[in-house]
Amino acid sequence: MINIDILKADKNWSLQKVKRRETLYATHGYHKYPAKFIPQLVRKVIIKYSKPGEIVLDSFGGCGTTLVESKLNGRKSIGVDVNKVAVLISKVKTIGISPALLEKRNEALFSRIDKKTVTRDFYHHANERLKYWFDPLQYNKLKLIYDCIQEEPNKKINLFYKCCFSNILKNCSIWLAKSIKPQRDFEKKEEEPVGAFKKHLNYMSKKNKEFVGLVTSRKVKDISCKMLKGDARKVNLPAEHVDLIVTSPPYVTSYEYAELHQLSILWFNYTDDIKKIKTKFVGTESKKIIREGMESGVAKNLVGILKEKNKKLARHVSNYYFDLTKCYKEMFRVLKKDKHLCIIIGDTEYDGIKIPNAEISVQLLENIGFEVKRVVKRKLSSKIFTPYRDKDGRFTDSKHGNKRKIYQYEYLIFARKPKGKGGEKNAKS
Ligand SMILES: C[S@@+](CC[C@H](N)C(=O)[O-])C[C@H]1O[C@@H](n2cnc3c(N)ncnc32)[C@H](O)[C@@H]1O
């Protein structure tokens, strides 16, 4: 087995020269999303491990970075995510709308918005959870914009507008800026909704034009991209269907995606019970029972140590690896023989205890039947995101007094599904 502890960071994969601005080319900057891939990194994996026309899968598709890069590089792609907001964003990032048509529809939308004024108090009848996050005037203005969006008959353009709307919600609410935890900030100066919406829509329209230009010049316009709402533990795809898997699982004790996207989830009425949908996410804290039986000695030892120190964390970590095992088995099932998988994952720390996700993933993959060919350690670029968090979980900089440093490195685990039958019997869940 590859010894992760002695690996040195590989400069070829660190992409230190890539600036944040460059990560936002084409449609990549449509919507903020936690733990988004750097497009240039995924592109490098896609080009090295697949051929044009082949199918790339991202089982934890998030905001669709893999899908966009696959399309731009002539590969078909499938994304899966349990989060409906992720599905919305990914679809919108890969559709490409005629710029001339979009310009016309935008003018019509802006004119509908400008003609309306807030005359009714929608806030009064709003969902209580939404009221928690919005000032009444802000809410009423957002409702006005949303009603105008809903008058757009073209389905693709309607989704495009919803994605734009979703992206401005946090800045127009009293959600503590840049916080990864749902916290209110009563001192916050929220963005004015109409101005924020128009500004972001203009930005997205410009980027749509760039995307359409790229897919046209590269002759990849008709390459298919599918984003499915689904569960990585049981993907709705036939066996041996895809040629490459590039994905990054959620980390244990890290982001609570359902909570982080609750403003959009509630606004679009995807559910009114965030707690209920949280249970469908891998890595959340919600389950009461402890599920064991993950196929990694390192994970078992870790859970044993945690049980002595922090029972809740032990349960949480154990359930996470139990679920991750299921996801990796599903990846084994849907991947064609002799094809590759690339898992991008970092270690985490909780209560001073290291959670060695990369080492455990290598063990899990090998025990399932994959051949782990290579592990690359890469330093995360400080130009793209700061590795510091303050005590409230907000991103901060190196000068901040009460900061803690997280995730300085991440790992790319390259594994291959063997040609023969080796390992497949283990892979049955
Ligand atoms: C690290 S993020 C992926 C980000 C992605 N690489 C990108 O560039 O946007 C992990 C994703 O896993 C999703 N997720 C969590 N549990 C899932 C499950 N059971 N099935 C599918 N997706 C899940 C989360 O909603 C989140 O979008």
Image (cartoon, helix red, strand yellow):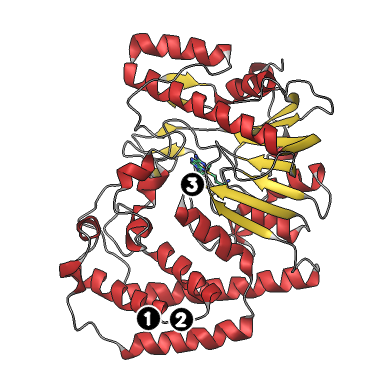
The residue wearing badge 3 is 82
Whole-percent x, y for residue 218 in the image? 80, 67
Q: Amino acid at mark 3?
A: Val
The residue wearing badge 2 is 152
Name the secondary structure under disc 1. helix
Q: Is residue 87 visible?
A: yes
Residue situated in front as seen by the camera: 365 or 192: 365
Is the CB atom of the residue marked by disc 3 within 8 angstroms of ligand 1's nearest atom?
A: yes
Name the secondary structure under disc 3. loop
Mark 3 and mark 1: Cα distance apart in space: 28 Å
Whole-percent x, y for residue 370 in the image? 73, 25
Whole-percent x, y for residue 295 in the image? 58, 17
Is the CB atom of the residue marked by disc 2 within 8 angstroms of ligand 1's nearest atom?
A: no
Quarter-of-image position of residue 142: bottom left
Q: Residue at x 36, y 32 (%)?
A: 285
Q: Kindly indicate whether the residue at mark 2 contacts the one at mark 1 (C-beta within 8 angstroms).
A: yes
Position of 119 with respect to 94 (left or right) is left
Quick one: label 3 or label 1, which is nearer the N terminus?
3
Residue situated in front as seen by the camera: 76 or 23: 76
Q: Residue at x 77, y 57 (%)?
A: 73
The residue wearing badge 1 is 148
Quarter-of-image position of residue 171: bottom left
Q: Residue at x 80, y 42 (%)?
A: 49
Mark 1 and mark 2: Cα distance apart in space: 7 Å
Q: Amino acid at mark 1?
A: Cys
- Disc on res. 327: none
Above or below 399: residue 166: below
Residue situated in front as seen by the camera: 269 or 45: 269
